[in-house]
Each structure stands twice: as C-alpha cells, then as structure tokens.
Image (cartoon, helix red, strand yellow):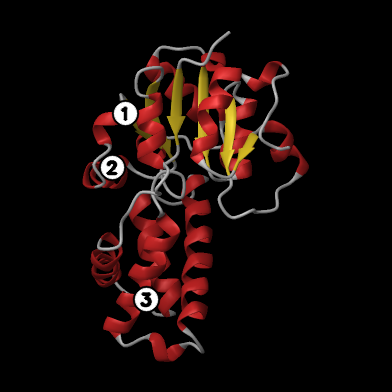
Amino acid sequence: MSIRAVVWDVDDTLFDYTSADRAGMHAHLAAEGLLHRYDSAEQALVHWREITDLQWARFGSGEVGFEEQRRDRVRMFLGAELTDDEAESWFLRYVRHYEAAWSLFPDVLPVLDALAASHRHAVLSNSSLRVQDPKLRALGVRDRFEAVLCAAELGVSKPAGAAFLAACAALELPPHEVAYVGDHPEIDGRGAAEAGLLSVWIDRVGEPAGDTAVAAARRISSLAELPPILRADTRFGAPSSFG
C-alpha cells in the first residue's frame, strides 16, 4: 500500500496564522486606541485568541454561521452591543492589519517542492472557501492544490470523519492512500486517523496532547520530516518520528 496524496490543513500548518494574528491584532488595537484596556499587549492578544477559539467551536458545531461567529468575536472582545454592520466594520479593519502580516512557514515550499512529482495535494480546512482560497493565492501556493475544501461549504467540519472522506472523494482516492497533515492533535490528528487516513500531526511548539491523539497520529516538529514518513507508510511498522 502507498500514499498517493497529501491533504493539508492551512492555518498553523502551512500558513503562520498565530504570528499573523498576533501582529495584526497588536497593530489593530494600537490603531483603535484599545491597548490601554489591558495590562499588556500580550494579555489583549490572549483574550482575543480565547474568544476566537470559543467562537470557532460554535461555528464548527453548526451553532452559528461563519459571519455570525466573526461578529460575535468582536462583540465579546469589546464587551459591547454592536450592530452587525458595526461589528463587521471593526473586524474588517482588523483584517487589513492581519493580512499585512501573512506568511508561510519556511519549511512549506521546500516540502511541497520535494513532494510535487510524487504526490497529489489538496486542502481541507475548518474555515470558509471565501477566506482560504484568496489566502492561498496571496501566499502564492493555490496552484499547488487540486482541490480546496472548507467546512463552511461542506456543511461538516473536522474532526468528523465525513470531512476527511469528502477530501478523499475529491481526489477520487480511498482513505488508506491519503495522508492528512494538520497542527491540532485532536481535530486533525485523531480525526484523520479515525477516518482511515495516514495522520500526521505537525507540532511546531511541543504541545502536550492526550494519549488518543498521540497514538493516532505521526508526530513531527518540521515538515522536513514528512517525506520519509510518506515513503515508509509507518502504519505498518516502519519507524515513526516519535523517537
């Protein structure tokens, strides 16, 4: 059995979302005159990320729509009753700062180049196509992927098996011939493994993870470790990167 395709997560896997979010929000809060509300800029950023995680979970569960979770992030962060237009306008001002800080991780282009001739590629994200497609184009990598699938359009999000199987169907390949690479041990790592894909968890910062996630996914700290895993197909006893 061989792995014929790689399906990729985007944020904090290919795209350095955390750094862009941090830089963008810092610049936005400074421009809006809001940094004084917090003891430090880092405290403000932590608060923003906590709210973002909460609202993304609501979106992922189907509780709210994509635009609604975005506006609710603003309302919670500011602690204010804003109209939809007011919340959307505030968010779009933040987006301008955020987009100015976009970048790929430095190991992305080398591994895409290394795998270009041997593997097919697609994207599966828990975001929206209206967000991820322009982002991938701006980063110069959209043409590397045969398909870009996102939860907002699919109607199902990771870690549900149906999301991973939709990516396999888009490639017309069975799950056992597809690898999935993502940064979240449960949503990406365990979800992909339970759907029958070769699951690879890119852990760039040494995050702790539950036993289930660790057992399910091949854990790597750099995408440079990915090509040997794909060649070895470690589900059948070849050495993994855990050491």
Residue 60: x %, y % from top left: 49, 46
C-alpha distance separating marks 1 and 3: 32 Å
Residue where numbered disc 1 is placed: 145
How packed mark 1 is, by other alpha carbons closer than 10 Å (few <14, some 14-19, many 20 or more), is some
Q: Nearer the viewer, residue 60 or 224?
A: 224
Disc with the residue nearer the chain's start (2 vs 1): 2
Few, some or many residues within 10 Å of mark 2 (<14, 14–19, 20+): many
The amino acid sitting under disc 3 is His
| Viewer-side residue, 141 vs 242 | 242
From this view, report whether residue 15 is shown above or below residue 85.
Answer: above
- Element type at mark 1: loop
Q: Quadrant of residue 37?
A: bottom left
Residue 178 x %, y %:
50, 20
* Cβ–Cβ under 8 Å for marks 1 and 3: no
Q: Position of residue 71 (x, y in %)?
A: 35, 64
Question: Which residue is disc 3 drawn over?
Answer: 26
Whether residue 15 is visible? yes
Q: Is residue 83 left or right of residue 63?
A: left
Q: Amino acid at mark 2?
A: Leu
Judged from the image, the secondary structure of the residue bearing numbered disc 2 is: helix
Q: Quadrant of the N terminus?
A: top right
